[in-house]
Amino acid sequence: MANCFCHWRRALICVCTPFISLALLLVYIMVMLCTAISSVPGTMPQNPHFVAPGTFKNESYAPLPKSFWDTNLPGQAIWNRLQLTIERRFNPILRPNKRMRGFKNSICNESILKNVYSEVTDANKNDDNLPQQIKDFQRYMHRRDYPLLLQPDGVCGAGAQDEKEPPLLLLAIKSTLLNFKNRHVIRQTWGQGGWVDGHKRNSNGGGYVRRVFLLGKENTDELGVDLSEILQMESKRYGDLLQWDFRDTFFNLTLKDVLFWKWFSSSCGQTSFVFKGDDDVFVNTPNMLSYLKGEIKKLQAHETMKGFMVGDVIVSALPNRANKSKYYVPESFFKGQYPSYAGGGGVVYSGLLAKRLHDVSERVTLYPIDDVYVGMCMVRLNAGPVHHPAFLTFDFRGKEEDQLCSYHGILLVHRRLPNQVLKLWANMKQTEAQCLDMPLRGADRRNTTAVS
Ligand SMILES: *[C@@H]1O[C@H](CO)[C@@H](O)[C@H](O)[C@H]1NC(C)=O
Ligand SMILES: *[C@@H]1O[C@H](CO)[C@@H](O)[C@H](O)[C@H]1NC(C)=O
Ligand SMILES: *[C@@H]1O[C@H](CO)[C@@H](O)[C@H](O)[C@H]1NC(C)=O
Ligand SMILES: *[C@@H]1O[C@H](CO)[C@@H](O)[C@H](O)[C@H]1NC(C)=O
Ligand SMILES: *[C@@H]1O[C@H](CO)[C@@H](O)[C@H](O)[C@H]1NC(C)=O
């Protein structure tokens, strides 16, 4: 009898223990899930930078919010909902250390994105008032696997002869098919590859520079002629074209970032810094090289190289809601404020950061404004761009430009036509001796260490 009772008890324990363990495990998972879901998208921090509308800039570091998209808005916008879905699919319990290893092909591949996307957009189908470019963007925003049409032969851009050390700087310049002249002038002036001396005011030397132009594809029907053979000739001759098979439109510019990072990660192992900018800017390359040479030691000493990005930082920007604007983003597409971002006219970041941006971009939904998208990826890396007053993406102020040495004190100025660039470059050479003492703008006032 006692034996029988014992037998039953043992059986009971055998049966019950797994259930109890399972229940405990379930409770644990639920708790983890709740904390994960509530902590990943987060809420907008009470930061003064993110309350005021409009833009302002100063030299303090960009704020580092946990998240810039509010997850609890009523009637959520498409981008916000897509991003939230991706956040949830990126299960923080399975990958608690926020690393993306193995993430690439399992969670965010295109077929899954497409499914997620159609779930979200089905609810927003009746929105016919949208401008065409937003509609075009929405239709293809799950796609990023556009093939390469042209690329430099097995190297990281033009300028690779007889390098005695790894390149210091890769110039990655956004261009379009028809801007032959811009490219030609850049090659002869500030975009020369090979060894380039730094500014003579300090003995930082210089570095090896490489160059690549980023292009999409032009619609041959709209253009009336097929210029692809001429582009092939240009590519053969200069070896500095990277072209992908997508339409080269304003809202597709983000693809140039994403696809460039991919190409960079596989082709440019050793490059220390990347300059990414427009083909209508003037860059003071000697200043840039001296500046970067000076930063490199500090960055390595502080181990902040992996988060280094510098440019003209815009904080507290809101999406443009004027429906005639080139930058118009409707509320049905995105709600919230923009993260701090470096103006897309020209920005410099470390090669290490480029690779990290490549990884993290897989789980940030494409956004039609390219520099804002880079800012979004930076937030996901818990990093932020550093402002530098020598990046003049909104040009000189007042009469400052007319001073003899004004161009010797800058890193970059936005909007210069090819002819102006030629003249400025020649002028710079002529006034070199006179302007030797011209300091870099803001060099006296600031003290950079990147946030990582
Ligand atoms: C930058 O702007 C913020 C917000 O207005 C302000 O609190 C901060 O003091 C400013 N920093 C500098 C260096 O002016
Ligand atoms: C995408 O993920 C699905 C499901 O995990 C898988 O069946 C498919 O092969 C993946 N596609 C690619 C291109 O990796
Ligand atoms: C981006 O390029 C793709 C591929 O060529 C095209 O289908 C799409 O319409 C383009 N998007 C925009 C917003 O122009
Ligand atoms: C654009 O905005 C104006 C006023 O801001 C409005 O009257 C007009 O209907 C809008 N157009 C579209 C296509 O939404
Ligand atoms: C920069 O800041 C660091 C620490 O904040 C300080 O030690 C260093 O002297 C500063 N450098 C300059 C040039 O002001």
Image: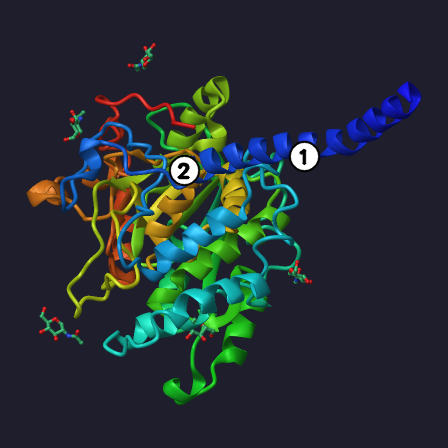
The residue that label 1 is drawn on is: 22
Q: Judge the density around disc 2: few (<14), some (14-19), many (≥20) Cα neighbours within 10 Å.
A: few
- Compared with 217, 317 (above or below) is above
Residue type (three-letter) at the residue carrying disc 1:
Leu
Residue 5 percent location from the top left of the image:
86, 24
Q: Position of residue 200 (x, y in %)?
A: 36, 29
What is the x, y in percent for residue 436?
27, 29
Amino acid type at image mark 2: Ser
Classify 10 Å Cα crowding around label 1: few (below 14), some (14-19), many (20 and above): few
Residue name at image x 29 percent, y 44 percent: 412
Residues under labels 2 and 1: Cα distance?
24 Å
Position of residue 412 in the picture relative to residue 52 (left or right): right
Q: Where on the picture, by quarter, is residue 92?
A: top right
The answer to whether 192 is drawn above or below residue 138 in the figure is above
Label 2 beta carbon within 8 A of ligand 2: no
User: Can residue 272 be seen?
Assistant: no
Looking at the rendering, the quadrant in which ligand 3 lies is bottom left
Q: Is residue 200 left or right of residue 359?
A: left
- What residue sits 33% from the left and 24% below the top? 448
Q: Quadrant of the N terminus?
A: top right
Q: How many badges with numbers are in the image?
A: 2
Residue 230 vertical placement versus 308 (above, below): below
The quadrant of the rendering that contains the C terminus is top left
Q: Tag 1, which secondary structure?
A: helix
On the image, numbered disc 2 is attached to which residue? 38
Front in this rendered view, residue 186 or 76: 76
Task: Report the residue at 22% width, 31% height from top.
Answer: 47
Q: Residue 13, how many percent across, how many down?
A: 78, 27
